[in-house]
Image (cartoon, grey):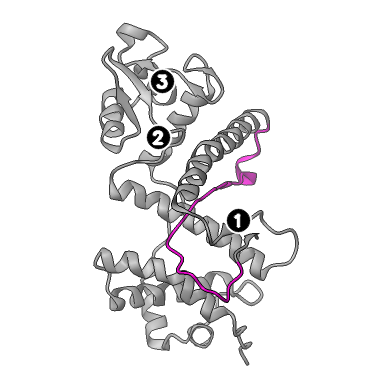
Amino acid sequence: MQLPAFPPSLLPALQHVMRPLVRLMLRKGVTYNCFAEMLKEIFVDVAEREFRLDDKPPSDSRISLLTGVHRKDVRRLRSGAAEEKNHLPENISLGAHLVSVWLNNAPFCKQRGRPLPLARLASSGGECSFDGLVATVSKDIRARVVLDEWLRLGIVRIDGQDCVHLETMAFIPQRGFDEKAVYFRHNLHDHACAAVHNLTEGGEPFFERSVHYDSLSSAAVQQLRQAVSTEGMQVLIGFNQLASELEERDVPEPEARQRITIGLYFYTEGNPPDASRPKTGRSS
C-alpha cells in the first residue's frame, strides 16, 4: 500500500495553526512528551474510526502504516482506548439551556433577546424570578446553587434591589479556567472541523468567512472590536432565536437529531511594517 504524498502547503499551514496551541500548553505546563503521547492516541483513534476498509476495523499493521506510530504502541493504545465524550458537561449544557430560556421565553424576557432582571427569590417575584427560571428547566437543582456558581463565573450580577441581571447573552463564563476550557474545546473543535471539511471534502462547503486588514490604528481596531462585540452578538442572538423556534416547531426523531455550532470571532495583534506588502483589506 502506497500512501499519497501530502500537499507541500499543508505542513506550513499546520505549523502556523499549532503555534497558539503550543503557547497555551507551555503556559499551562504541558510538555512536548505529554502532548506527543496524547497525539499518538489521537492518530491511532482517528485511523481506527475513520479510515476503515469495507467498514472493517483496520489491523494494527495498517494503522501503523497510516499513522507512522510503531505497531507496539498501536497495540497498546488500542487495548486501552477510551470513548471520547463529545457532548458538553451537564453543568455547562444546563447553563446554556437556562440562558436560552431567559432570553427567549416569557415571562423572563420583554421580547426575544431582551432578558428581564429577575427577582432572586420566588417569594418576591413569583414565577418571574430566578427561582422560577431554574424551576422551569429542572426541579432537582436548587436555584441558589446555580446562582452562586453563575456569580463566580461572571454570568450574572445582583443589584441593590436583590434582582439578578444576565451579564452575557450566552453561557460564556468570564472566570473559571475549567469552564472556559470547555468552550475552548467545543468551539475550536467545530471551527476546525468546518475548515478541514472545506479543505478536504467535496459537495457544499460549510460557511467559513473572515475579514482581515493589516494597517489599522489602535483607535480603529478598538472601534471595530466594539462593533463586533455589539453587532456580532446581535447576529448570534438572532440565530439563537431562530434555532429555538425551529427546535420547538420541527422535532426530529431521536436518531435523526443533529447539532450545530455557529461562531463569530475577532482577533488583533501587532503587525510590523513591511514595505513589500500592499496595505489592503481582504475577505476570505
How crowded pointer 3 is (Cα within 10 Å; few <14, some 14-19, many 20+) is rated as many
The picture places residue 204, in percent across and down from the top left corner, at: 74, 58
Residue bearing mark 2: 95
Does 217 sit above or below residue 225?
A: below
Give the residue type that dot 1 points to: Ser
* Residue 210: image tag: 1
How crowded pointer 2 is (Cα within 10 Å; few <14, some 14-19, many 20+) is rated as many
Residue at image position (60%, 55%) is 211
Q: Residue furthest bottom?
A: 2
Could you tell which of marks 2 and 1 lies nearer the N-terminus?
A: 2
Does 187 sit above or below residue 98?
A: below
Residue at image position (29%, 78%) is 33
Give the magenta part as a residue range: 250-278
Residue bearing mark 3: 133
Q: Residue furthest front?
A: 275
The picture places residue 147, in percent across and down from the top left corner, at: 29, 27
Quarter that holds the C terminus: bottom right
Q: CA distance from mark 2 to mark 1?
A: 29 Å
Q: SS for tag 2?
A: helix
